[in-house]
Amino acid sequence: MFEVTEAGDEEDLLALGRMVSYACQRAKTMNLEFSTYCLEMAMMSLMQDLARSGPKRPKPEERTAKMNLGSGFH
């Protein structure tokens, strides 16, 4: 179980979840059944940790403000 101790830990946990999700999708695409199973178990564990820690999700306007940081790049 992952215990959130600092505000940055929540962001790290979410980033880890994104990476596991991506790896799981790639494993599914490549028909790697056992790898997919293991990654799905890891994803379920991360989701349980997120539910226990109750991270505060940014409001939509806060997310939009963060996303607009790179608006000058094409």
Image: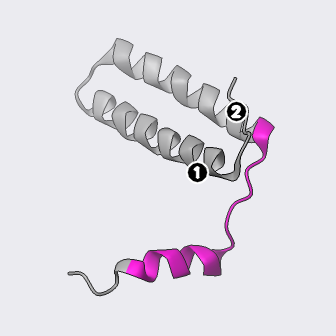
- Mark 1 lies on a secondary structure that is helix
What kind of residue is marked 1? Glu
Residue in front for this viewpoint, 30 or 4: 4
Front of the two marks 1 and 2: 1
The single residue placed furthest to the bottom in the displayed view is: 72
Residue 60 drawn in magenta: yes
Label 1: which residue? 11
Q: Where in the figure is residue 71, as x and y percent of width and height?
A: 34, 84
Q: CA distance from mark 1 to mark 2?
A: 13 Å
Above-or-below relation of 33 to 67: above
Mark 1: few/some/many CA within 10 Å (<14, 14-19, 20+) = some
Q: Residues within 10 Å of mark 2 (few under 14, many from 20)?
A: some
Residue 45 forms part of the magenta stretch: no
Q: Position of residue 26 (x, y in %)?
A: 29, 35
Magenta stretch bounds? 52-69
The kind of secondary structure element at disc 2 is helix
Q: Is residue 19 left or right of residue 12?
A: left
* Residue sitting at x 71%, y 46%: 6
Q: Quadrant of the N terminus?
A: top right
Vertically, is 43 above or below 36? below
Could you tell whether 62 is left or right of 55 in the image?
Answer: left
The location of residue 11, given as percent across then percent down, is 58, 51
Single out the residue that lies furthest toward the top: 34
Give the residue at mark 2: 49
